[in-house]
Image (cartoon, rainbow, N blue to C red):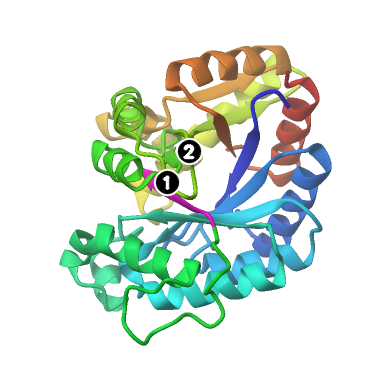
Amino acid sequence: MALPLSVIDFATVREDQSLGQSFADSVTLAQHAERLGYSRVWYAEHHNMSTIASSAPAVLIAHVAAHTESIRLGSGGVMLPNHSPLTVAEQFGTLAELHPGRIDLGLGRAPGTDPRTLRALRRSPEAAENFPQDVKELQGYLSGNSIVPGVNAVPGAGTNVPLTILGSSLFGAQLAAAYGLPYAFASHFAPDALVDAVAAYRSQFQPSEQLSEPYVIAAVNVIVSEDAQDAARQLEASQRSRVRAMVGRGREFTEEEMDMVMASPAASQVLHMISYTGAGTPDTVVDYLHRFAEHADADELMISPTATRQPDVLTSMELLAKNWN
């Protein structure tokens, strides 16, 4: 693939599906991505969301890694203020020792949840203010040059698990630039600051031991089908599912009620979040992604296959990979 393609997986719990089935789907997705030549699969830490089961990325990565052979696996991301840097270093150090050369560690500053769940995580709302220092502490553990006297990560020390800063604002871009780390922008659900953040990152980048030149990963939603009408149907189903989850928050709607919800300002706000979406036939989506990559000034695209059915997700991935150039 000329421009690397990767996949973000939320371990989606679909309608009438158990959590165990969602994890089985994640294994299948990663195996599929491996066969098709995708660069990596990342898992996002979210909490208290009935449709997302990727709340423990390190555990899920371990399971998927045991059922794949070569594809890189990582977090997109671990919400670092929810955890101690030492714990994260030990978890990902363990993964790196078990699966050498295959583990990534993407780091986010947000809680990945609501305020009530944040308290249940024993996380202080002020913890995000320590994010830059926590990243440095984590780097020290993984490199074997701990900045905490007398404390080392075992496993972890010397694994040099590569770090990536995730973000959707100028803060993450500037931090990634200052620390000389790759930057991944969450444009699949937070589109507004993409261009400005990437520009700031590239202009302010300082080389580091991990990275000599800036490296940008931009996330984008995709739905690919051989039939344009089928792609449009999948897109509508995906949009309605997203709005139902975020606006309804557990409430059940009839289809007639959903029609009214979809016409509401709240739905418009949700749909704006997924503005960067390529949907259609392979040629249409490939063209869209090339234009998006240029717009985002990206070195790699992280696709989020948003179809509501697992077979359609796998088909999207296959059609895209076969037609990517």
Mark sitting on residue 208: 1
Mark sitting on residue 212: 2
Pick whichever, 81 or 261, lies toward us.
Answer: 81
Q: Which residues are magenta?
A: 162-167
- State which quadrant residue 299 falls in: top right
Pick whichever, 177 or 107, lies toward us.
Answer: 177
Q: Main secondary structure of the magenta part?
A: strand
The answer for how far apart the CA atoms under marks 2 and 1 are is: 6 Å
Amino acid bearing label 1: Ser
- The quadrant the N terminus occupies is top right
Note whether 285 is above or below 101 in the view shown. above
Could you say where residue 259 lies in the image, as x and y percent from the top left?
Answer: 42, 30
Q: Secondary structure at mark 2?
A: loop
Horizontal side of 165 relative to 322 (left or right) equals left
Is residue 301 rendered magenta in the image?
no
**CB-based contact (under 8 Å), mark 2 and mark 1:** yes
Amino acid bearing label 2: Ser
Horizontal side of 314 relative to 212 (left or right) equals right
Pick whichever, 112 or 13, lies toward us.
Answer: 112
